Amino acid sequence: MKILLILSVIIGCTFAASRSRSLLSLNEENWEDVLKGEWMVEFHAPWCPACKDLQKAWNSFADWSKDLNIKVADVDVTTNPGLSGRFLVTALPTIYHVKDGIFRQYQGPRDKNAFISFIEDKRWSTIEPLPSYKHPNSPQMGVVAVFFKLSMAVRDFHNHLVENVGVPSWASYLGFATVTLALGCVLGFLIVCVIDYVFPTGAAAQALAKEKAAKKNANKNSEKSKETTEKTTKPEPKKTK
């Protein structure tokens, strides 16, 4: 037992030592720091084999960050699902270059020398920036981030029901399906009501058209009455001898 404890401590210390002191960690609270200056950001997950293979090269690259006058960071998508949605991370590892709030996805070789030359030679300038509608700081990507966090919360709740409460998996899935259908029906009903209010059809449209016609006729009648009143009250010109 003591041997296992000692081995675990040694492995933990080795892992901690392998992480560069210059490597920054980004999360939901501080990710907006990348909007200023120049950054290289890697998205990874602990269970990802390719991410583990990249770890050594990425930490070595982080050691060069001060010499290159940039900041090197990583994001754990398992603890920051909102960021994976905000950056539309669909494959791991994913690497972004950021320069003064302009984002470009890195697609080159994944070794230290390639990263260094990518910055020194400004090879990022040949890459097309992300369009405005995909910009991580845009409102629409903020909505995507909320949905990613919601999906992670649902998954965690499902795991809690199955592992801790003892609910069968099929029952948990059935419950989520029922709630999803119910919410879909309610949202659909609300959307139909809004559309009918903004763009009325049938009897409602006819009533609205009649109301507009009545207002138009009333305005015309009021204008005619004003003209008649002005004519009757207008003084006659004096006759000259």
Image (cartoon, grey):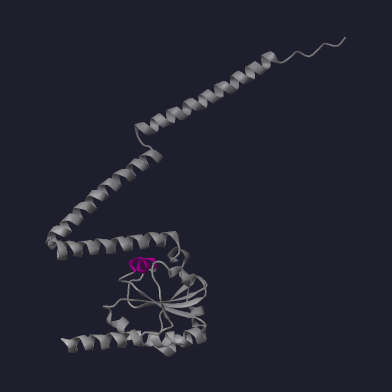
Provide the residue span drawn in magenta. Answer: 80-86
Quick one: which residue is furthest to the top in this view?
Answer: 241
Q: Within the image, what quadrant is residue 52 found in?
A: bottom left
* Horizontal arrangement in the rendering, residue 147 relative to residue 7 (left or right): right
Quick one: which residue is furthest to the right in this view?
Answer: 241
Dominant secondary structure of the residues highlighted in magenta in the image: helix
Residue shown at 19%/52% (left/top)?
178
Q: Is residue 89 above or below residue 49?
A: above
Q: Within the image, what quadrant is residue 140 found in?
A: bottom left
Quick one: which residue is furthest to the front in this view?
Answer: 2
Between residue 222 and residue 25, name the one nearer to us. 25
Report x, y in % for residue 54: 34, 84
Report x, y in % for residue 148: 32, 63
Report x, y in % for residue 182: 23, 49
Q: Within the image, what quadrant is residue 208 found in?
A: top left
Q: Is residue 62 visible?
A: yes
Residue shown at 36%/63% (left/top)?
145
